[in-house]
Amino acid sequence: MSEGREGRDGFLTGAFLLAASSAFSRILGAMVRIPLARVMGDEGIGLYQMAYPIYSVMLAMSTTGINIAVSKLVAERVAQDRWRAVARIFRVALQMLLLLGAGGAVVLALLARPIADHLVKDPRAYLAIVAVSPALFLVAVMASLRGLFQGLQDMRPTAWSQVVEQIVRVTTMFTLGLWLMQRSIEHAAAGAVFGAVTGAVAGLVFLGQRYFAARDELGRRAEASVADHVEPTGRIIRQILNVAVPISLASIIMPMMQFIDMAIVPARLQAQGLPYQIATGLYGQLSGMAYPLIYVPTIFTAALTMSLVPAVSEAKVKNPEWVLRRTQLAVRLNLIVAIPSAVGLAVLATPISDVLYREPMAGIPLLWLAPGVIFVSTQMISGAVLQGLGRADIPVKNLMIGAIFKLILTYLLAGTALGIRGAALATVIGFAVNAYLNTQAAANLQGRSLDTLRLSLLPSLAAVAMGICAWLMHAVLGARVGQGRATLLAIIAAAVIYSVLLLLSGGVKVAEIEMMPYIGRPAARLLRRLNIVRR
């Protein structure tokens, strides 16, 4: 039984669409922060930041795992033509998320005062925490709908709802933040964070419309599907929790790793004789400047994992041979993005830090962190494969092992002459251990290697040539057009050079380019005419 092109590569279109919507949302969110900071000042932004991370952690713990679990279970039932089971899984998941979302919203609202007074130690954060609490309920309902559509391997509703949600969110943030600033800073912060609520309402309305438009078709498929036994509610709940709980635990481990840095790095730097002001500044360069940059390239990886989990789940049911093909395809596409990103961040670490933060010294930890892009993205892809194969527990165990390595090495290396470089290196090694363990586990479950080294060859060669050209261009142009323009031109040139080299070497195929939504087919036609890309 051969796998057709649509079945083999169809999830790529959804991944590209999700990546585009995620990139748009992040860019829009970052852009609105600039005028908002000017209006509200550092105090207002500080109050906003006290409320939003608490909401984000509770949201990740309550909905992220269930969303992925629903997509996995739905994909498996669709592959078996069990559409009645699909409807039942969705109803049970929706009920679970309604309870979790409502409970989380009530708990957050009730605990807003003690959180403001004792946890963040600023009573003015109370209004912002209360203002964001209803979003927990709304986003939980959205998670069930997104899980359903992702399980059906239709990523368009999720992608477009993210765009709608973000547009409404940032509009509310700026409008209410500006308007309520006339009353007080705490009211302005509450108004800004309330954008999470209005954005969730908009996203939910969009998803609801798409669901009701598709409901009749889902009903017809259920009537025409194979005879199916009714799964008990308790069994469905257990199946959802078996996938969701490990994923939710994994979402806690990453903040714990950041807490490790906060607790250890400044203290170990001070143990080397550095004043606490300098130690704190170096820690800020690592955690507040370098870390965010290495996570930017993972936007595409995160989108790819959302498509990969249901794609692997479906393939496991229909034909296990397809799992390896889809896995290797995802690994290759991930490396195509991750490897040049790591090289580019390493080669241009100092000028990028200077342009973005006016702090060229942040380029030191960024240089040492840059290889982590490859490992963290590989860990995400291999983790998604394991989740699709029904072993969501393995990525959590491996993540904990990686965190232990990071903990030990951070303590040892940050206290040596390496200093902040040692802390960055410890993080990279932790990611590498996690990526290796995940990749080996995925290969063992499938009985065949994922061929990560072979698949990285062409991207690596192209990325090295790209890095040399980018470094030379920046060195030549820096004194002539200024550091900012030279950095921008070097990045653009690097992207063009890498893309051309990859196309000429066959690292990207025309069929994969066609998978890109909206622009893929015209781009593929142009490349065919130029005869510079392999079929």
Image (cartoon, rainbow, N blue to C red):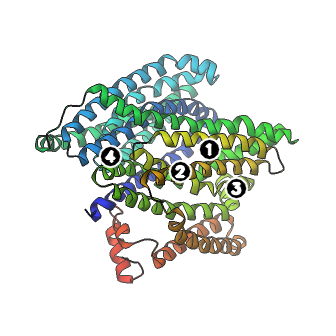
How far apart are the alpha carbons under marks 4 and 2?
Answer: 21 Å
Most distant residue in the right direction: 273
Q: Position of residue 441 (x, y in %)?
A: 50, 49
| Mark linked to residue 379 | 2
Residue 273 place in picture, x, y as percent: 88, 41
* Circles 4, 2 touching at the beta carbon (< 8 Å): no
Q: CA distance from mark 3 to mark 2?
A: 18 Å
Q: Residue at x 71, y 52 (%)?
A: 365
Tell me which residue sits at (72%, 41%) in the image. Answer: 408
Is residue 502 placed above or below 104 in the rendered structure? below
Q: Depth-wise, is mark 4 or mark 2 nearer the camera?
A: 2
> Disc 1 designates what residue?
402
Residue that carries the numbered disc 3 in the rendered image? 368
Question: Residue at point 41% right, 30% down?
Answer: 135
Residue 531 is left or right of residue 504, and the answer is left
Which amino acid does the dot numbered 1 rest on?
Gly
Dot 3 or dot 2: first in sequence order is 3
Residues 182 and 474: in front is 474
> Which kind of residue does numbered mark 3 sit on?
Trp
The CA span between labels 3 and 1 is: 18 Å
